[in-house]
Image (cartoon, helix red, strand yellow):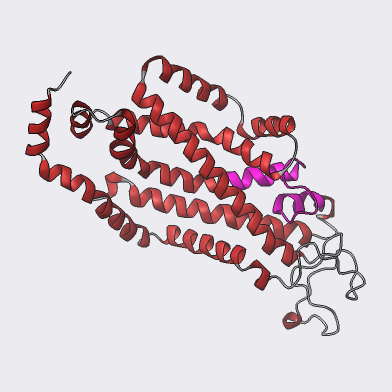
Amino acid sequence: MTVSRKKAIELLENEAGDITRLFEKPTGQWRLALRRFRGRRSGMTGLFIVVGLILVALFAPIIAPYEPNEILIGVEDVTRRDPPCIHLLGCPEETPQHIMGLDGNVRDVFSRIVYGSRVSLTLGFFTVTLALVVGSTIGAISGYAGGWLDNILMRIMDVILGFPSLLLAIAIVAVLGPGLRNALLAIAIVTLPGYARVMRAQVLAIKENDYVTASRALGSSTRSILLKRIIPNSLTPLVVLATLGVATAILEAAGLSFLGLGAQPPAAEWGSMLARERNQVFTSPHLVFFPGIAIMLTVLGFNLMGDGMRDALDPTLNR
């Protein structure tokens, strides 16, 4: 229904208080969400794990005793796949200390695990950022425009969703060629439909609100309405989805690297470390155990933090 200019002005004047609260409400919502998040032990546990991993990645050169690709044979009296040696736990003092042992190329596993956090976290954050930006843009345009454009964009998203995500990522990397950059692009492509659908649902609900109708009647452009009115009020579920998406991206990147399609030797990446030493699971289990634990802790941390954020931002719980 078309709203006249005079009617739109009256609507804005009569609801001046509501419009003022529109810009004040997000701050209150985020403060309330922060208080609720602090009260969830699982969410705080995930936050501590994620912050710890980020600090490890930032200070990797200080934490790691060796360079990730430094071969120690001839430098120290060591052999291939030496087990962990910690002096405080009874390892002989004359034996070089390697708290997670050495791999098949006589490299310090602990140093490679530490530097691997940089690769995995960077890939996870960049993948989710790319998928979030592209997917949200598609969802916003689709939901606001409607009609044939909505049908075309959503059918494309349906086609992507019709394939198992890891298999589609493998197919994309197989076409583009192995490597971290192509793995990042492939994972972003297979995950963007989720962001597009969530944004579209939010836009469909918000674009019928009075303040959007008033802005449209006053002659605001589509771009202005989307950027100033609709998208800022659609971010809550996307923030939760993005947090959980980082864990998924890291897991899928590790899977691609395990198959030889992601990180290439000699890069220190947890999935490729597992793949390289998978046949030593019984003879040198530390070479499989520690990279697996690193992947598990990272995924667990982001999942716990995402669950805590979802509960904190759930409007049905904000009583």
22 or 228, which is in the foreground?
A: 228
Q: Which residues are magenta?
A: 249-276
Asked if residue 314 shows in the view, the reply is: yes
Image point (75%, 77%), residue name: 86
Q: Is residue 57 above or below residue 230?
A: below
> Which quarter of the figure is the N terminus placed in?
top left
**Figure quadrant of residue 102:** bottom right
211 or 98, which is in the foreground?
A: 211
**As drawn, is 156 to the left or to the right of 78?**
left
**As drawn, is 75 to the left or to the right of 257?**
right
Which residue sits furthest top? 148
| Magenta-drawn stretch contains 269 | yes
122 or 295, which is in the foreground?
A: 122
How would you classify the magenta stretch by its main secondary structure?
helix
Which residue sits furthest bottom? 93
**As drawn, is 96 to the left or to the right of 250?**
right
| Residue 223: percent from left, percent from top | 34, 32
Asked if residue 294 shows in the view, the reply is: no
290 or 206, which is in the foreground?
A: 206
**Figure quadrant of residue 227:** top left
Image point (76%, 67%), residue name: 67
Image point (56%, 47%), residue name: 126
Q: Is residue 145 above or below residue 282?
A: above
> How many numbered marks have been drawn onto this rendered protein structure?
0
**As drawn, is 144 to the left or to the right of 273?**
left
| Residue 26: percent from left, percent from top | 27, 49
| Residue 69: percent from left, percent from top | 80, 62
Q: Is residue 203 above or below residue 56?
A: above
